[in-house]
Amino acid sequence: MDSFLKKITEKKQDFESKRYLIRFGKGDYKRRFLISFSKGSKIKIRGSFEWANDFVKFIRENKEITFSGKVLSKDKIAGLDGRKKGGMFAYEVMNSTLKEFENPYFYLVDTNDSEIVLKVKKSLPKPGKNEEKIDDKFCSLDLDIKYWPKVKEFLFWDTPDCKEAKIEHELIITDIEMPKGLNDPARIRELAVRKGKMLRKITADKKESVKEYVLEI
């Protein structure tokens, strides 16, 4: 199990990871994919909206638990009543295992037990926000310390041993290779290949480091 960012850095990207870059054109985008943690008797993780699905994925992989909130899907799901808005379907869930939502657009859900507490805001941020206004606490995940080895591998695989860390990313997209033979603007955006580089900036116990990755996705 890999997070969307780990897939990108290890060039194992798929559509699940690529979808977070579809909205970007050519340019320099700072303070993206924000995530942080502090570690004491519990692990406290905070992230921008892109991390909501990975937080839910991590929980479902490690514990049988139910969720309540809202699930957004681009497709209508047979047998469920969803509210359509802006080309998307919103499904309200209560104490759900989420098994009926295997390919969601976004999980905007919460859960709470003695080992795991997840809170996610229920409205996605509007596109085009100033980088300084990006919400780095859109989703929060508090875990029992026993989950640290697994969550480190999933979300903080390259972070040095530390008590707390903040990670942000800068996307520098220098070229976009468009697919040929398509007329649908939405499909063109989805299939276009964005090229450039990504800077992964890690501040671990106040010590800063930067890793650079070639971006072609």
Image (cartoon, rainbow, N blue to C red):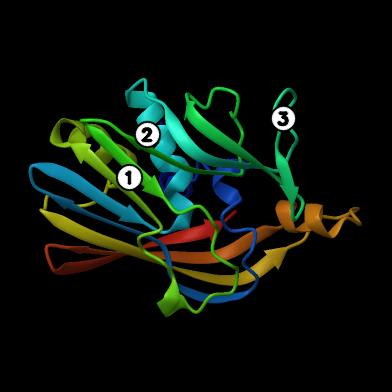
Instruction: Tell me which label, 1 or 2, sits earlier in the chain.
Output: 2
Residues under numbered marks 1 and 3 in contact, where contact means CB atoms less than 8 Å apart: no
Label 2 environment density (alpha carbons within 10 Å; few <14, some 14–19, many ≥20): some
| Alpha carbons under labels 1 and 2: distance apart | 9 Å
Q: Are marks 1 and 2 in contact (CB under 8 Å)?
A: yes
For badge 3, the amino acid type reads Ile
Query: Helix, strand, or loop for circle 3?
Result: loop
- Residue at 83% x, 60% y: name it: 185
Q: Position of residue 7 (x, y in %)?
A: 46, 43
Does label 1 or label 3 sit earlier along the sequence?
A: 3
Quadrant housing residue 167: bottom left
For the residue labelled by badge 1, is the local secondary structure a helix, a strand or a loop?
helix
Give the foreground label among 1 and 3.
3
Q: Residue 22's spot in the image, x, y percent? A: 64, 58
Classify mark 1: residues with Cα within 10 Å, few (<14), some (14-19) or many (20+): many
Relative to the observer, which residue lies in front, 16 or 160? 16
Q: Nearer the viewer, residue 17 or 93?
A: 93
For the N terminus, give its image quadrant: top left
Q: Percent position (x, y) of residue 123?
A: 54, 57
Residue to which mark 2 is pinned: 58
Left or right, 200 with reference to 13: left
Residue 89 percent across, percent down from the top left: 70, 43
- Residue drawn at (45%, 64%), measured in percent from left and top? 198
Q: Secondary structure at mark 2?
A: helix
| Mark 3–mark 2 distance (CA, rounded to whole Å) | 23 Å
Distance Cα–Cα, label 1 vs label 3: 30 Å
Which residue was labeled with disc 1? 155
Q: Is residue 120 above or below residue 65?
A: below
Reading the image, the residue beneath label 3 is: 77
Quarter holding residue 112: top left
